[in-house]
Amino acid sequence: CVAEVVGTYLLVLFGTGSVAAAVLTGAQVGLWQVAVVWGFGITLAIYATAAISGAHLNPAVSLSFAIFRRDEFPVNRLLPYWISQMVGGVLGGLTILWLFGSFITEFEAVQGLVRGEPGSQLSAMVFGEYFPNPAVFGTDEAARSLISPAKALVVEASVRPPQRGLPTKHLAPFFIGFTVAALISLFAPLTQAGWNPARDFGPRIVAYLAGWDAIAIPGPSSGFWVYIIGPLIGGPIGAAVHEFILGPLRKRQAEEAE
């Protein structure tokens, strides 16, 4: 489980760090630049931990394995993995606070923000995700938080070796990272692309303790739960699509080709 701590830490460090740089310094001039750093961070984290822990790095991925791959991942390993991933997320959030703390303070002063008061989610978004006004998007927000992780899990399950005619295990991390980067480019303007409960809630705890209080948890619209429950439902849905639809189709094609 130490590998899950390290992998999730790397993921949060690169991903949340790119968000912090974009929001606080303008270092990233476009969403795609932020997304590429996210994708690279995920790729690096997978390479660093895949041989040790399987590189779940996401509670939704671990839950999907516990449901559909019990022979590979027994249910009794689920809680230790979740705890390790959360620890990695918190450590990543603490590192971001240490690296960008002075930038956050300056940003709040320039923007006229009071930490912990309404509007300070503009600086808190460095740590956790916030979605637009529910009056604009209504209940569709929860739906988006289901659909996106489902798509990501379908791709991840599809490229994990061994899969006939698909990338080897050495290339799979690149495809997973690129897929997440592409999904971020599409969904981040709507939901901040919150598909990993450890990535969101770990740094969000740091924000809460650093003075954002209710702006961090439960959030301005009490919507932080969406980024926890949504992926935990959407992830297994994506895994089910692979297990019961794509997987059998590939197996049938492989048998016909022999």
Image (tube, rainbow, N blue to C red):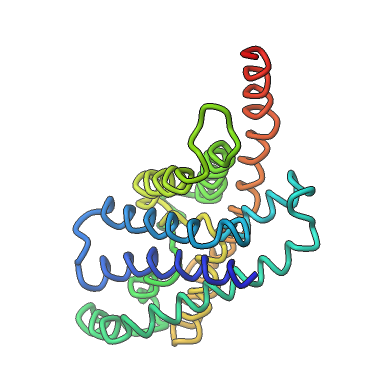
The N terminus: image quadrant: bottom right
Q: Quadrant of residue 38?
A: bottom left
Left-right relation of 238 to 31: right
Measuring from the top left, give residue 145's x and y in whole percent.
53, 50
Left-right relation of 135 to 31: right
Left-right relation of 192 to 82: left
Image position of 99 with respect to 144: above or below: below
Instruction: Please tell me which residue is depicted at 53% across the width and 78% down the height of the picture.
Output: 205
* Label total for image: 0
The C terminus: image quadrant: top right
Q: Quadrant of residue 55?
A: bottom right
In the image shown, does 98 or 159 lie closer to the viewer?
159
Instruction: Please tell me which residue is depicted at 53% across the width and 49% down the height of the picture.
Output: 139
Measuring from the top left, give residue 188's x and y in whole percent.
38, 52
Instruction: Please tell me which residue is depicted at 50% across the width and 79% down the height of the picture.
Output: 91
Image position of 183 with respect to 95: above or below: above
In the image shown, does 229 or 243 lie closer to the viewer?
243
Measuring from the top left, give residue 246's x and y in whole percent.
62, 28
In the image shown, does 32 or 224 lie closer to the viewer?
32
Instruction: Please tell me which residue is depicted at 27% across the width and 87% down the height of the picture.
Output: 102
Image position of 245 with respect to 150: above or below: above
Measuring from the top left, give residue 203's x and y in whole percent.
48, 74
